[in-house]
Amino acid sequence: MNYLNRIYANHVILGASGLTADGVSNADPEIAETYRAMVHRGTDTIIVADHSKIDKTAVSIYAEWGEISELVTDVEPADEELMSALKLSKTNIKLTIY
């Protein structure tokens, strides 16, 4: 963590265990803490997660959607609350095939 607090990144690309209207989460609290530090040290944060993570909660939320620049996924979220949170935070959704 000391190392992460001393660096700066233009782009941070992270995965996730869960994506809900509350934000992006990870199943491992220690990894979530590391990801949280990385989000705070970067200009743009990109989350890459397939459709199986949509509307799933994990142990620790490490970022709110307002901190995320882009979500890269294979299917647009059908969950209305999540879509509303993404739109309100102006998080770009990029659909891609894995």
Image: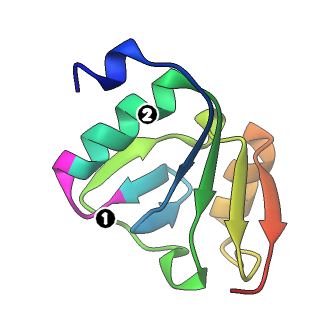
Residue labelled with disc 1: 58
Nearer mark to the viewer, of 2 and 1: 2
Q: How many marks?
A: 2
Q: Residue at x 64, y 61 (%)?
A: 82
**13 relative position to 87: left or right:** left
Along the line of sight, which residue is nearer the eye, 8 or 83?
A: 8
Task: List x then y, in percent, for residue 7.
Answer: 44, 18
> Residue, x 60% and y 34% (percent of image)?
67
Rendered residue at 36%/48% (across/down) = 61
Spot occupied by residue 94 in the image (x, y as percentages of width and height) = 82, 64
* Residue at the image position 48 percent from the left and 61 percent from the top: 15
Residue that badge 2 annotates: 38
Quadrant of the rendering where the C terminus is positioned: bottom right
Residue type at mark 2? Met
In the rendered structure, the answer to whether residue 60 lies left or right of residue 73 reads left
Q: Residues within 10 Å of mark 2 (few under 14, many from 20)?
A: many
- Name which quarter of the figure residue 59 lies in: bottom left
Q: Quadrant of residue 28?
A: bottom left
| Residue type, label 1 | Ala
Q: Is residue 27 magenta?
A: yes
The quadrant where residue 72 appears? bottom right
The magenta region covers: 26-30
Colouring mode (rainbow / by chain / secondary structure / one colour): rainbow
Q: Position of residue 41 (x, y in %)?
A: 49, 23
Q: Secondary structure at mark 2?
A: helix
